[in-house]
Image: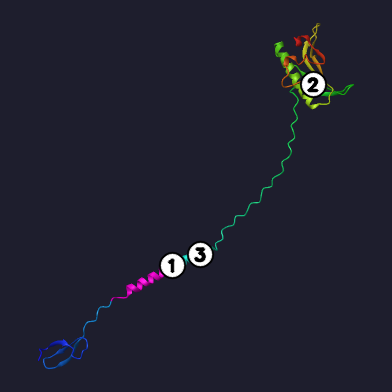
Amino acid sequence: MSMPGWYPDPSGAPGLRYFDGARWTDQLMRSPNKKETPKWPWIVGAVAVLFLIGLIGGQDRKDTQPSTHTGTATKASAPALVEPARPVEPQKPKPPEGVSFRTESGSSGEVVFGSFRISDAVFMGLTRRGAQNKTIEALKYAHSEYPNATKVFIQGTFPTKDAYGNSNQDTIVLNVGYEKVTLDRINFNGVDTGKIWDIRDSGTVHPELAG
């Protein structure tokens, strides 16, 4: 006979059964179960994967859906009303400073008179040149503003004293007349200032002013 102890169960059941040296007892020692691998890590991992898939899928759906956000619509500004450009009227030339003009009816048409006070430049040569320049300016203006005038007279006054000692502040020392045909020939931008009185058609120049 065998010695008392734990032996494989003669019935074939898993585990051990105690033998007391005479017979088999009811004391059993089952084989310990294999330690089962815990399943919760897999469950947690599966849940995490499903969560990520759902998150990505939701984001894709959000990206593909048309945006319902309506921003503040910018109103198109109404086009500004542009006034039609007014035709620019050519500016009329201004009369030369200090020269006054008047017209009279002559036998052959309108006659223009331009009058001014000759400035005293101390030296007669400078006084003469100033009066000649003013004569050109007055003729140019009259020819432009009175194109139908048949004749233009330019008159200049200057203070004088006669042989008796009488003074006259407005003595006409310059009275030169130009026919229309002469005015049409003058190049007012190139005429010789010193010769403007020489080409007159009529009139007189005081000897002291003429030089």
Do tag 3 and tag 2 residues touch (Cβ < 8 Å)?
no
Question: What kind of element bears circle 2?
Answer: helix
In the figure, 106 relative to 167: above or below? below
At a point 42% along the width and 68% down the height, the residue shown is: 53
Quadrant (top left/top right/bottom left/bottom right) for the N terminus: bottom left
* Nearer the observer, 116 or 202: 202
Segment colored magenta: 37-55
Choose the circle earlier in sequence order: 3 or 2.
3
Residue 21: x and y in percent read 11, 91
Residue highlighted by disc 3? 64
Q: Quadrant of residue 104?
A: top right
Rounded to the nearest angstrom, the CA distance separating label 2 from label 1 is 99 Å
Residue highlighted by disc 2? 183
Do tag 1 and tag 3 residues touch (Cβ < 8 Å)?
no
Choose the circle earlier in sequence order: 1 or 3.
1
Quadrant (top left/top right/bottom left/bottom right) for the C terminus: top right
Q: Does the magenta stretch include residue 38?
A: yes
Residue type, mark 3 in image:
Thr
Residue 41: x and y in percent read 32, 72
Residue type, mark 1 in image:
Leu
* Direction right: furthest residue: 107
Question: What kind of element bears circle 1?
Answer: helix
